[in-house]
Structures are given as structure tokens and as C-alpha cells.
Amino acid sequence: MTKTEHEKLLAGEEYDYRDPELRKMIAKAHRLMPVINDLSDLEKRQTAINDLFGHVGEGLTINGKIDVLYGNHISFGDNDFINDNVRFQDSNLITLGDRVIIAPDVKFYCGEHAIDATKRWGTYENGQKYLISFTEPISVGNDVWIGGNVTIICGVHIGNNVIIGAGAVVTKDVPDNTVVGSVPAKKIKDLKPLN
């Protein structure tokens, strides 16, 4: 059975980003983001939030303008707090646990390209070039605080009870009960486990 381009995307395989199903999802996100980013009609805003995202837990706060690529690949837990100018490049699943705090200017990047420049572009039968992209999910556990201007790269799992210092670039998994920071992010200290 042949996979759809969306199924290939979620499986981390090479996919055609110009696929009509994918373009339709992106168009929906573009249509709903101005409603979500407008605080003048909270009822319409909440309807758009529920319509766009894959899952919305209880007590989600979006405190300012955010940006998404697809939207439906994002799942929020209960009582998550998303600050201004957060970018979700959700070309794969982004899953947030409960009580996640995301400071301003945080970026989640699920997509990547080949290190070898000769493998970044493919050619269709008609001779037209296309960008080859691969994706991996990002997951964030419960009780996580992500500081301002953090970048989280595809394939990363962040455990429970974690603090990520401002400006960090997270390229590897972060275990439970840990503070990390720097570029690339590295362990700074342990945190006392939550009861």
C-alpha cells in the first residue's frame, strides 16, 4: 500500500511538501492563526484554537502571538503557558505535557535536511527541482520551563521537571529533573524530583 505524503512526513521519510493535502493543512493554519493571535474576540479565538490544534488540554494560555506551520500536529497538555512569538515548525508531531511554560521567542523545529549538499535537492521527472526534507517529532514532558529564545531541534525528547536556560539550542534528549543551557545545550545541574 502506498503511503500518502502526510504519512511519509510523519514517518520521517522523504516527502513532497507541495502535496495538495499538506498545502490544505498549511492553508488552514494560515487562515486560523490571525484569529488565534487576535485577543478581541475570545470566543472565536477559543474555537479557532480547538479547530486547529491536534489536542488542547484544559487551561491552555497563549499569551501573545504565535506561529505554526500545520497546527494539527501540535498537542498541548493541561495548564500549558505559551508566551509571545513562539514558533512551532510542526512538520512532525510536537507534544507538550502538562504545566509546560514556554518563554518568548522559543522555536520548535521538526524538519531537517541532509548534511551532504548534493542530497538536499531531488529532481522530478519533468526536470524541476524540489527540496528534500525529513522530519522527526519533538516531545516535552510535564512541569517543564523553557527559557526565552530557546531552539529545540527535531527528534528531541525533553523529560519531566526540566528547566532549559535562555538562549539554549537543544539538540539531544534531556533527562528528567535536569537544568540544561548553552549552545549546544548541556547539563548544568540536577533538580530535586517532584513528589
Image (cartoon, grey):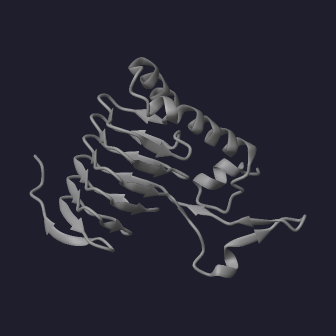
The residue closer to the viewer here, 151 or 10, is 151
> Residue sitting at 32 percent across and 59 percent down?
149
Q: Is residue 58 left or right of residue 123?
A: left
What is the x, y in percent for residue 68?
50, 45
The residue closer to the viewer here, 146 or 73, is 146
What is the x, y in percent for residue 127?
88, 68
In the image, residue 107 sits, relative to residue 112, either above or below, namely: above
Q: Is residue 161 left or right of residue 57?
A: left
What is the x, y in percent for residue 56?
40, 32
> Residue sitting at 67 percent across and 73 percent down?
120
> Residue sitting at 10 percent across and 46 percent down?
195
The residue closer to the viewer here, 32 or 72, is 32
Residue 115 location, quadrant: bottom right
Count of numbered tags:
0
State the residue lying farthest toward the front. Answer: 40
What is the x, y in percent for residue 116?
62, 81
In the image, residue 72 sits, relative to residue 94, either above or below, namely: above
> Residue sitting at 50 percent across and 58 percent down?
110
